[in-house]
Image: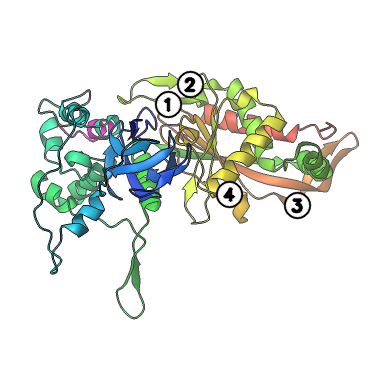
Amino acid sequence: MAQVELIMPKMGESIMEATILKWVKNVGDTVDIDETILEIATDKVDSEIPSPVAGTIAKILFQEDDVVEIGKVIAIIATEGEDLAATPSPAAEVVASSGSNGVKKESPAPATSAPATAEVATMVAPSRGSDGNGRFYSPLVRNIAKKENIGEVELNAVTGTGQNGRVTKKDILAYLNNRTGAGTQSAPAVSKSIAQPVSTSSATSSVSGDDEIVEMDRMRKMIADHMVMSKRTSAHVTSYIEADVTNLVNWRNKVKGEFQKKYGEKITFTPIFIEAVAKAIGDFPMINVSVDATGTKIIVKKNINVGMAAALPSGNLIVPVIKNADRLNLLGLAKSVNDLANRARGNKLKPEEVQGGTFTLTNVGTFGNVMGTPIINQPQVAIMAVGAIRKKPAVIETEYGDVIAVRQMMFMSLSYDHRVVDGFLGGSFLRRVGDYLEAFDASQTV
């Protein structure tokens, strides 16, 4: 019938490329509609790419670990009735063209169809974000270069490790680290040093009898880059309060069995925290902002999209986002929290589910910590941490005077960008969240 091109899908407005992690299907394998063909990764999330049609894999155009531009054809699927020509994948071609000594022999370039030629021409042509020489720079790379006062000439000297020599975020951050520490070292010399390939596996090599070097995995490298960039971008300040959450603890203990029986969902503290955060953002909308690339304009976000930091089995961290959290009731929030957390642990999140956050909540109490000073999740300007809930003696006011009683107490902290959030706003917002939690209605029914 026909041959269908499998395209590297668009993963978000700021994402221009993705890395192929693993081909689940090989040339000659049959696939059903929506069956996973390959796994890819961006600087946001790992994803599985399903087949848009039922058919047979006719051609694989890129190997594992290749960085591919969004919109590029990555494979050809022959649908039922199509005459499938045996076309080996790039990896198979390398093996087939090697002699007994393992050295790759030259082989003639394969014939290219007219559509493929048009595709190549499209990708080579200069596009928005490229310089006068046709070299492409993503908006993120441009933004980092601007903030670090890297001019066009110096940026052109950075050697890129991305597809077609593109400069990735990792390249420019590595360049900046060398640039800062190298002193008198010239830009071209630095760019050569960072152009060496870096393994993304979790390889371990022994240094001595007592020490060893463990290679960071790909996600840990991206987290490290993002955290360093955030500290370099924002002026971090942290405020703290302690909240009496006895009412909500007693309510949850009372209704959690009935809640799960009635709705099929567990009720944890997280949706209650997110509900209070969403209400407080409505009261203080200037906490729900970001700063533009120039550093001089504030972008006020109309949607309240709350990210929740989730620990993965690997020990890494990911932040799925609950969109329009202020429009969901407690049941809706509980369903969203449970769904995103479960799929995060199973590596099943979609790229759009970790994008678009306007505020982040992290629960350090999960690990038994009573408080923390989290790093802002760029481009947001604030992140809240809630600690472990502990029974403590506290002074409470009654109609008979002050008394000391055992209460469920919790520390809360807010790290905020002091460029645009002053102490009054940050402290008032944090206190308002605490007020909402303390005023939780323990008599409400499920």
Cα–Cα span, label 3 and label 1: 37 Å
Q: Which corner quadrant holds the N terminus?
A: top left
Please state which of the two labelled residues, at mark 4 or mark 3, is closer to the viewer: 4
In the shown orientation, is residue 304 left or right of residue 376? right
Q: CA distance from mark 4 to mark 3?
A: 17 Å
Residue visible at 18% across and 39% down? 164
- Estimate the x, y position of residue 426 in percent, counting from the top left: 53, 31
Q: Is residue 144 magenta?
A: yes
Say what secondary structure mark 3 lies in: strand
Sequence-earlier tag: 4 or 2: 2
> Which of the two labelled residues, at mark 4 and mark 1, occupies the earlier sequence position?
1
> Residue at horizontal 53%, vertical 27%?
425
> Does the residue at mark 2 contact the one at mark 1 (Cβ under 8 Å)?
yes
From the viewer's perspective, tell me whether residue 75 is left or right of residue 438: left
- Position of residue 116 relative to residue 189, above or below, is above
Say the numbered circle drawn on residue 364. Answer: 4
Q: Which residue is mark 1?
A: 290
Marks 3 and 1: which is nearer the front? Answer: 1
Q: Residue furthest right?
A: 400
Q: Which of 404/263 is in front?
A: 263
Instruction: Residue 264: say if magenta.
Output: no
Could you tell me how far apart the alpha carbons at marks 4 and 1 are, in whole angstroms?
24 Å
The region drawn magenta spans 143-151
What residue is shown at x 20% (from left), y 24% (from top)? 127
Relative to 55, say whether 220 is above or below: below
Whether residue 7 sits left or right of residue 337 in the image: it is left
Residue identified by numbered label 3: 391
Identified at 9% across, 47% down, the residue is 108
Rendered location of residue 265, percent (x, y): 72, 40
Residue at the disc numbered 2: 301
In this view of the protein, can residue 369 be seen by the observer?
no
